[in-house]
Image: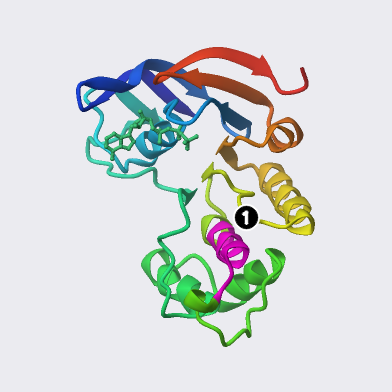
Amino acid sequence: MIELTDVTKSLNGHYVLDHISQSFMDGQVYGLRGKNGAGKTMLLRAIAGLINIDSGQIVIDGRKLHDGMDFPPSLGILIENNNLMPEYTARKNLQLLAKIKKVASDADIDATITRVGLDPNDKRTVKQFSLGMRQRLAIAQAIFERPELILLDEPTNAIDSDGVQQVRTILLEEKKRGATIIIASHTAEDLVVLTDEIYNMAEGRIYEQTDAAK
Ligand SMILES: Nc1ncnc2c1ncn2[C@@H]1O[C@H](COP(=O)(O)OP(=O)(O)OP(=O)(O)O)[C@@H](O)[C@H]1O
């Protein structure tokens, strides 16, 4: 469970996260909706431990973030796809990451690359990939270690329509596996199809919660 209590973050004199208190329950899929600049990415970054918050606290499974725990212990993240290494193939990208946690085998890596619709034997490097291929690899990167928490910023960006279905299927499978997933998206259909609850954001605040079915 993730519990945010009175979380604030200011940049250039205004709140980008404005006293957010919100819980995210295990195994649920949450959507974040809101205009450009509403604070969706900042909220994902804060939960991921990628930014320091100014006040309040973020507690993940009973442990406070930035208090002896820099990042959520089991995290998959897609926030912009620029943390791919352009000089390497898809397989090499995941193999290098896998060395850190050592939870994914080469077979897991190849299976995940296939699962997102790419070819694990593709000899091209990421810099030769199309935008959509990079996005698919970024999704693979977020899920290949079977994390308990998956944070996704615009996961279907640049992905073709077959790919969008594929990504949705994958994320529903990840939910079934028990992952907690938070998705920021401008694609209404992604939010309706994938999420249990949608939080509407504006000006750094969550101002409304809607049941995804409505
Ligand atoms: N590096 C930065 N320096 C200063 N302000 C920033 C920085 N990054 C984001 N912001 C500000 O933080 C606020 C929230 O931005 P954020 O990226 O979280 O919005 P978002 O809801 O994800 O928008 P989008 O739909 O465009 O992705 C905005 O006002 C933005 O201008």
Residue at the outermost front position: 36
Residue at the outermost bottom position: 123
User: With respect to residue 40, does 134 lie above or below?
Assistant: below
Residue at screen point 60% across, 30% down: 30
What is the quadrant of residue 91 in the picture?
bottom right
Residue 110 horizontal/vertical position (percent): 63, 75
Residue at screen point 45% across, 80% down: 88
Residue 73 horizontal/vertical position (percent): 40, 47
Residue under label 1: 158
Residue at screen point 42% across, 60% down: 82
Q: Is residue 67 left or right of residue 137?
A: left
Q: Is residue 61 left or right of residue 144?
A: left
Name the quarter where the C terminus is drawn: top right
Residue 39 horizontal/vertical position (percent): 42, 28
Q: Is residue 134 magenta?
A: yes
Viewer-closest of 10 and 131: 131
Q: Is residue 168 magenta?
A: no
Range drawn in magenta: 129-140
Counting every numbered tag in the picture gives: 1
